[in-house]
Amino acid sequence: MRILVFGAGSLGSLLGGLLARAHDVTLVGRDPHAERVREDGLRVEGEVSAHVEPAAATAVPAERFDLAVVTVKAFDTDAAAAALASVDLDGVLSLQNGLGNEERLADALACPVLAGTCTYGARLRGPGRVDYTGIGEVVLGPPGGGTSSLADRVGTAFDAAGIETTVATDMPRRRWEKLAVNAGINAVTALARVENGALSEGPAGDTARRAAVETAAVARERGIDLSDETAADEVERVADATAANRSSMLQDVDAGDRTEVDAINGAVVERAEEPVPVNETLTALLRAWERERGLR
Ligand code: KPL
């Protein structure tokens, strides 16, 4: 399969690197990372060690691709949609945090858009180097649920590259479950400056579970079958499986970059019909941190 990975940050580089073991992959990212991948290839280290040689560019090449995998931050989704609008594609898979990304891509693109969740731990170590810090899973399918031949093809292609992938018919519920995980893990690890594994016990872990439980309540208000127990258990399971990982939001804070708080905890607050005090507090704290640094 010819695959374009749009957003060669931590997760995009890891997935692009793993996919390049079986497919013709082009990474779109920033220099100096893209330049180094072009010159010396991409080194994946950690759970898997591999040296692969995908193509890499800072803009989308005018070529045909079977699939574009979008891995940019939620606040860059509209820019991704604009960049992909003129590309000849069979389909797009959004593997992004937060709610609403697939809808924004689908509004701008003529091809079908799949929703996906990914719980891999990844960290960009430097130009041309990505660490695989936690084995996870990719789940993908049509955003509204049900089946599609594109989802089946993409699932087969990911499996062929050794990426454990589930093709799901219940993506609306899966997206809310992943939102609950991110609402719990990302903001708490970013504010406490701890790795995911630190959430196994103590007050930080309690706060993460409470944020996830609030998210499950909002999901139920919207007709999604997600129990408090499932949401809290998923936070624990993912925090354990990616214990050595610095969450994507902590990596943003480490780098002094804008975070995805609006698309994660902010999205929970925005959709809630009843008070969600933990998500409100986490959103307010991260927004204050961003404001202080002139990031919003
Ligand atoms: O999605 C993640 C993220 O960091 O954004 C998890 C699964 C929590 C891994 O850190």
Image (cartoon, rainbow, N blue to C red):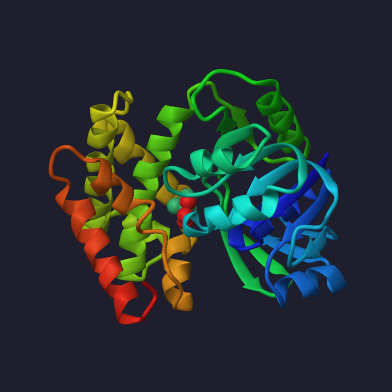
Task: Locate residue 279 relative to residue 178 in the image: left or right.
Answer: left
**Residue 6, relative to residue 57: is it above or below?**
above
Image quarter of the C terminus: bottom left
| Residue displayed at 43% across by 63% down | 249
* Residue 177 rendering spot, x and y as whole percentages: 39, 36
Can residue 258 be seen in the rendering of this structure?
Answer: yes
Q: Is residue 246 left or right of residue 5?
A: left
In depth, the one of 192 and 265 nearer the eye is 265
State which quarter of the image contains the N terminus.
top right
Q: Residue furthest top?
A: 146
Q: Position of residue 234 (x, y in %)?
A: 38, 39
Q: How many marks?
A: 0
Q: Nearer the viewer, residue 173 or 164?
A: 173
Q: Is residue 280 left or right of residue 34?
A: left
Instruction: Name the residue: 81% across, 51% down.
Output: 25
Residue 79 versus residue 18: which sits nearer the camera? Answer: 79
Residue lying at the far bottom of the rendered structure: 293
| Any part of residue 47 in sight | no
The image quadrant that residue 64 belongs to is top right
Between 197 and 15, the one lying in front of the other is 15
| Picture coordinates of residue 273, whole percent (x, y) | 17, 37
**Residue that appears at 85% across and 60% down:** 53
Task: Identify the residue at horizontal 32%, vertical 48% (top origin).
Answer: 267
Position above or below: 269 against 186: above
